[in-house]
Image (cartoon, rainbow, N blue to C red):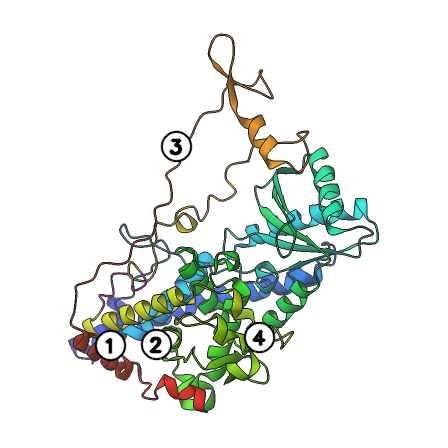
């Protein structure tokens, strides 16, 4: 304190406290700057390293560096949470926590490297069978938007046989080499897929054949993520937001990853901050999440409007472009989104649970309004428990996904998951004791009790009169600084 008294002896006591706080902030910022410079230097050195094997073009979009920010996990708070009592602005704290959540959820360098090796082993197996084939990565890993538990999507093209035969051949080859511990072939799906799990790492992959659309759509999304830097943090949060509620799969009527990417893209294209430099400079992720939930939760006109993300984004009368939408409508909101790769295709048609999604967005919007008006203590998370559940396995097992190795199934009958399951069953012997049906010499496997995933219940909140809820929404909208009605975006 001696140096501080020497330099600030002429200040008042309250000014000294402010000076100390500023010094701490400057030191924290200097540490972040040094960390960023270190990562950039390491990135340059890795780029110059010509001895390393060249990665496929599909991996170029994946960000290798992760934040080195030190976290002190507080009991009772989610693992990504960093308390910032010096930030009084609620919107700014929401912005910072979204960044912390994304920092926690995005894949580490080791996880990316493991996925690259996994894809390389699949590629080598394909080339061994069909030397002239092409193997490429698409989907969330290609775009850098994958959650820690996400599969790797692999497309195989230019093969001399039908996709069904190719899947069985690849399954035979990888099983015989002991490369996979589990597989499932789904030939009846709209896009036939072979699902496999790596024996060495436990990672999963979805392998499709002769499907070029997946790579083209992934390239489109990757280009838009570069154009709109706000897309990645919003998407990673919203993907988990939907995943924990079981609304993230297209085949169950939810909002799949590609559809969600286009929905977020349209929102950012139409956001008024892009038309006003002053708004853009002051627009945080907290503002954007607030407006996204309001836009799709209560303002967007699902009855008459369709969405296009081409040429800067627009809306159109959906009855003129997709008249069949009126026939399928049952009174609830029906999403209509024109495919950017094929304008005659409606990406929103498969999302038949849109009424549930709209209610979910509407509820989440009012949760944020409630936090804004009543005030949220800086020592607690703003995302939990109203918006997301930190007890979900994706969070609790964040760094355990590759800790346990799966049981090997090499040598078992090909592409028959039912026979695989039978082989794993423990059958009684003559003495009535259980033994492994495929290896009697191995010691019994220690059983591990697995807690079933509990359905996420709706957050409990005090019941408030409807008028009070609307007042909170109006007060929160004014507090965020955007006085323009979101419903007017469609008229621009």
- Closest to the observer: 455 or 376? 455
| Residue in view at x 33 percent, y 74 percent | 92
Q: Indicate whether 447 appears above or below 311.
A: above
Give the spatial CA distance, label 3 vs label 2.
43 Å
Quadrant position of residue 1: bottom left
Q: State the extent of the magenta-drawn residues as a range.
A: 376-383
For marks 3 and 1 on the same chain, the one whose residue lies earlier in the sequence: 1
Q: On the rendered structure, is 92 left or right of 429?
A: left
Q: How crowded is mark 3: few (under 14 residues within 10 Å), some or many (20 or more)?
A: few
For marks 2 and 4 on the same chain, the one whose residue lies earlier in the sequence: 4
Disc 4 target residue:
224
For marks 2 and 1 on the same chain, the one whose residue lies earlier in the sequence: 1
Q: Which mark is residue 298?
A: 2
Please identify the residue farthest to the front as the structure is shown: 327
| Residue in view at x 73 percent, y 51 percent | 163
Residue 320 image point, x, y percent: 54, 84
């Amino acid at each position: 304190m001696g140096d501080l008294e020497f330099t600030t002896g002429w200040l008042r006591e309250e000014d000294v406290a402010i000076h100390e706080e500023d010094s701490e902030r400057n030191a924290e910022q200097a540490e972040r700057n040094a960390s960023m410079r270190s990562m950039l230097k390491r990135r340059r050195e890795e780029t110059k390293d010509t001895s390393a094997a060249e990665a496929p073009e599909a991996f170029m979009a994946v960000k290798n560096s992760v934040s080195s920010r030190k976290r002190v996990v507080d009991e009772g708070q989610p693992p990504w949470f960093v308390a910032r009592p010096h930030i009084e602005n609620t919107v700014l704290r929401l912005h910072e926590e979204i960044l912390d959540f994304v920092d926690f959820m995005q894949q580490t360098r080791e996880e990316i490297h493991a996925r690259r090796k996994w894809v390389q082993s699949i590629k080598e197996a394909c080339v061994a069978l069909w030397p002239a084939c092409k193997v490429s990565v698409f989907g969330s890993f290609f775009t850098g938007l994958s959650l820690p538990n996400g599969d790797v999507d692999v497309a195989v093209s230019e093969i001399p046989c039908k996709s069904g035969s190719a899947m069985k051949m690849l399954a035979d080859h990888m099983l015989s080499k002991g490369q996979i511990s589990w597989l499932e072939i789904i030939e009846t799906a709209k896009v036939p897929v072979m699902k496999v799990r790596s024996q060495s790492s436990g990672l999963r992959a979805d392998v499709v054949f002769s499907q070029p659309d997946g790579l083209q759509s992934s390239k489109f999304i990757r280009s838009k993520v570069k154009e709109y830097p706000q897309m990645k943090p919003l998407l990673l949060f919203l993907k988990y937001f939907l995943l924990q509620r079981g609304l993230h799969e297209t085949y169950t009527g939810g909002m799949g990853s590609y559809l969600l990417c286009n929905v977020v893209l349209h929102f950012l294209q139409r956001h008024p901050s892009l038309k006003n430099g002053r708004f853009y400079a002051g627009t945080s992720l907290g503002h954007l999440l607030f407006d996204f939930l309001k836009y799709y939760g209560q303002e967007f006109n699902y009855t008459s409007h369709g969405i296009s993300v081409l040429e800067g984004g627009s809306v159109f009368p959906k009855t003129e472009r997709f008249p069949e939408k009126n026939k399928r409508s049952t009174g609830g909101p029906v999403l209509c989104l024109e495919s950017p790769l094929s304008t005659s295709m409606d990406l929103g048609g498969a999302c038949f649970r849109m009424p549930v999604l709209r209610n979910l967005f509407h509820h989440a919007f009012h949760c944020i309004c409630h936090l804004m008006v009543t005030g949220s203590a800086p020592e607690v998370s703003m995302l939990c428990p109203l918006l997301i559940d930190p007890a979900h396995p994706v969070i609790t097992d964040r760094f355990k996904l590759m800790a346990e190795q799966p049981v090997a199934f090499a040598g078992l009958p090909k592409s028959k998951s039912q026979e695989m399951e039978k082989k794993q069953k423990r059958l009684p012997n003559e003495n009535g004791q259980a033994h492994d049906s495929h290896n009697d010499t191995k010691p019994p496997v220690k059983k591990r009790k697995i807690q079933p995933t509990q359905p996420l219940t709706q957050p409990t909140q005090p019941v408030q009169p409807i008028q009070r809820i609307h007042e909170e929404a109006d007060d929160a909208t004014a507090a965020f600084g955007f006085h323009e009605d979101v419903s007017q975006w469609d008229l621009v």
